Amino acid sequence: MNDKDRDKMSNNSNLPFIPGWNASLESAFSAYKGPYIPGRIVTQHKTVWNILTEKGELQATISGAMRKVGKQPVVGDFVVLLDQSDLNSYTIVDILPRTSCLSRGSAGDLSEDQLIAANIDTIFIVTAVGHDLNLRRLERYLTIVYSSGAKPVILINKIDLTEGLPDDPSATIQEIKDIAGDVPVIALSALSKTNLEQLDPFMKPAETIALIGSSGVGKSTLINALLHHNVQKTSDVREDDDKGRHTTTVRQLFLLPNGTIFVDNPGIREIQLGDSSDGIDRTFSDITELAQNCRFKDCTHRNEPRCAVREAVDQGVITQERLDSFHKLNDELAFQADKAEIGLKGVEKKKYKGIALARKYIASKRQ
Ligand SMILES: Nc1nc2c(ncn2[C@@H]2O[C@H](COP(=O)(O)OP(=O)(O)OP(=O)(O)O)[C@@H](O)[C@H]2O)c(=O)[nH]1
Ligand SMILES: [Zn+2]
């Protein structure tokens, strides 16, 4: 990499070259005096992390103190390393403040082991014309992205496909725009490289981007198209695993030639709805707004009289499907919150108790 690229990426040639490093990280790091260096996690193994530093890519474990409190760095994290290079040893001693956190499923549970990635600026929610297009699923993804703290962008891939589709792509694209609110929606084709330039405004140097979306929508194809012929993603890293065996791992954080940073790992690919009540409100801002005119402050928009949301459904302002989706996501959150509070066992019991009561009720009706 030449100096010009370096400057572009750190915006300031005095800062160390770590992808995404900036002045506020520099200031947080400046509290560390002594043999410490900063770095960014590029790959997470079970007990070992690969970290990009000014010295190149290093492997490190975490300090006993961090282990004790259950603090675990994830891919994308900026960390502080104790540099004992004379002993060929590096230890992660701290995680610098995160600007966003992507966490997996089980909500209400924001424990460290639920985190998948940190410090992602923008998340491309990838869908594809044809079978994957599902507005309800898109709402789930939007909810996840909002609650992570990253900015969402919706990509509709495979617009080169026109034949044999159940729906007209332009109609579906419009439907997506209707639920997307202010979120940018970009229709493109990773395969035929159509409209890829429309992603340029989001792919700035030092910006960290992740892609989420169902299997098969074309995330890998898109990343490869954006990488051009860059080798960093495709060249796997041969290294020893935690037990000293040789393994091949794919780097989970990698750079585009222009300095944009991409994060991709299995955890992100399998992402589920997390603790997202705030995200739900933002995804369904139309419903939240309408709800202010409901008669009851705590209206659930199910059976209450003078519910402004259900009136809006009756008038065709919002669809029944959208309200159903809102209810479903809220129910799921409530279930997950319960689970976090009383433990899975309790919830299972509660569920069975519910089933038992329902059986009793049905039986009483039959008599
Ligand atoms: N026609 C068409 N096919 C595409 C396009 N992008 C990807 N595909 C195809 O869709 C299939 C799945 O693409 P992938 O890139 O592997 O999808 P993915 O989202 O990474 O899937 P996972 O790795 O399972 O998460 C492959 O056969 C691609 O060639 C596109 O723009 N147009
Ligand atoms: Zn209501």
Image: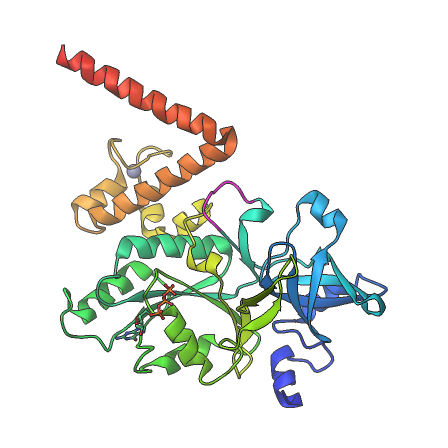
Q: Is 2 situated left or right of 154 in this image?
A: right
Magenta stretch?
Answer: 104-110
- Which residue is most to the front? 245
| Residue placed most toward the observer, 309 or 220 | 220
> At 84% across and 63% down in the image, what residue appears?
33
The quadrant of the picture showing ligand 2 is top left
**Quarter of the image where one finds residue 329:** top left
| Residue placed most toward the observer, 206 or 272 | 272
Look at the image and say whether residue 344 sits in the magenta stretch: no
> At 19% across and 14% down in the image, what residue appears?
363
- Which residue is most to the top? 367
Q: Is residue 339 above or below residue 285?
A: above
> Residue 28 location in percent, x, y?
73, 62
Count of picture labels: 0
**Quarter of the image where one finds residue 43:** bottom right
Q: Is 267 situated left or right of 47 in this image?
A: left
Question: For the N terminus, which image quadrant?
Answer: bottom right
Render colour scheme: rainbow
**Quarter of the image where one finds residue 253:** bottom right
> Residue 137 location in percent, x, y?
31, 54
Q: Is residue 342 above or below residue 235?
A: above
Question: For the C terminus, which image quadrant?
Answer: top left
Chief SS of the magenta region: loop
Q: Is 231 situated left or right of 271 in this image?
A: right
| Residue placed most toward the observer, 259 or 64 | 64
> Residue 295 location in percent, x, y?
30, 34
> At 52% across and 69% down in the image, what residue appears?
250
> At 13% across and 14% down in the image, what residue appears?
366
